[in-house]
Every structure is written in structure tokens, then in C-alpha cells.
Amino acid sequence: MEDRYTYRVTSTWMTGKFGIVEAADCPVPVEFAAPPEFGGEDCMWTPEHLFLSAVGACFVTTFRAIAEFSKLEYLSLEVPVEGVLEKVEKGYRFTQVILRPELALARNEDAERGQRLLEKAERACLISRSITAEIKLQPKIKAPEAVAV
């Protein structure tokens, strides 16, 4: 692997109260607006949504790589992400990001290992490591019930 990578996107303000963000290697632009509480539109992606999406997507892809390397068999991973935006001395900022991964395992005996790998993914996620907000991990492990013989 190389030591340095560069990523580029272009954000453009369109008419009214929305804009688009594009990347040359992504075929579908994403429309966005400011959130309603800051004078924006309802039912549109906001920079705040995109920020939390980046944290969640990074966590999922990091976990997938770690689980694959560790040969952990899992059935699914869903990661609800919640961000706390607060007004502080220099203005609004995310002060806390809460990750609530729900990991469904194939085997009961992998529960402890699944927990460890979720914690490792949280520590290794490059987006989480790049932000100043406190990251909280609140995982939920689902393992199949033991089958009575």
C-alpha cells in the first residue's frame, strides 16, 4: 500500500436552497441542503447526514476487512449512527458520535470475538480517527440460540 492517497469531490450550490456534491469516479451526484433548523429543506441529505454517513460507512468497511482477515463468520452488520451537534465557544460542532453496531453472528461461540473486532474496527476507522468529536461505541451482538438436542 502507498503512504498517501488523495480524494476529491466538488460541491456546487444550485438554485434555491439545495446543492449537489459530485466525484469524478462516482456516477450519481448527491443532492443536499442545509438542515431545516438552519433554514434548509426538509427531506434532503444535509452536510450533517453526510458527515455521519462517512463515519458509519468507514466503520462498516473497516469491520468487514478486519472480520475477513480474522475469518469471523457473521450474517449481517447494521450500524445506526447518531451525532450530537452542540453550540460551543466557536460555534456549532459535533461533540459526540455514537455508533450502535448490530452484529448478527453465525455461531454463539463467536460473540466475544465479535465484540473485540467491533472495538478494533472503531479504533482503526480512519474517519473516526480524523475527527475531534468523542466516539462512543454501543454494540449489540446477536448470536443464534443454542439448539436443544
Image (cartoon, rainbow, N blue to C red):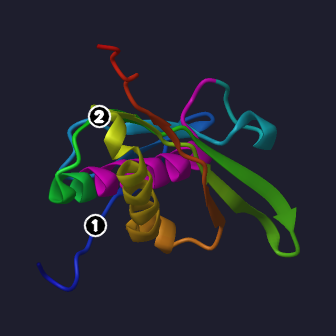
In this rendering, the label closer to the viewer, 1 or 2 = 2
56 in the magenta segment: yes
Q: Is residue 8 above or below residue 22?
A: below
For label 2, count other residues whose C-alpha is less than 10 Å away and answer few (under 14), some (14-19) or many (20+): some
- Dominant SS in magenta: helix
Percent coordinates x, y for residue 69 in the rendering? 16, 59
Residue appearing at x 35%, y 14% in the figure: 148
Q: Residue furthest top?
A: 149
Q: Compared with residue 13, is residue 55 higher up or lower down, i.e. above or below? A: below
Q: Is residue 127 above or below residue 84?
A: below
Secondary structure beneath dot 2 equals loop
- Residue 111, image quadrant: top left
Q: How many marks?
A: 2
**Closer to the camera in the image, 8 or 61:** 61
Residue 39 among those drawn in magenta: no
Residue linked to disc 1 = 7
Helix, strand or loop under label 1: loop
Say whether marks 1 and 2 touch (CB < 8 Å): no
C-alpha gap between disc 1 and disc 2 = 38 Å
Q: Residue placed at 22% from the left, 56% from the top? A: 65
Q: Nearer the viewer, residue 74 or 127?
A: 74
Label drawn at residue 55: none
Q: Is residue 45 left or right of residue 66?
A: right
Residue found at x 38% / y 69%? 124
Q: Indicate the position of residue 106 as horizontal and vertical percent values.
A: 27, 31
Magenta residues (range): 43-64
Residue receiving disc 2: 107
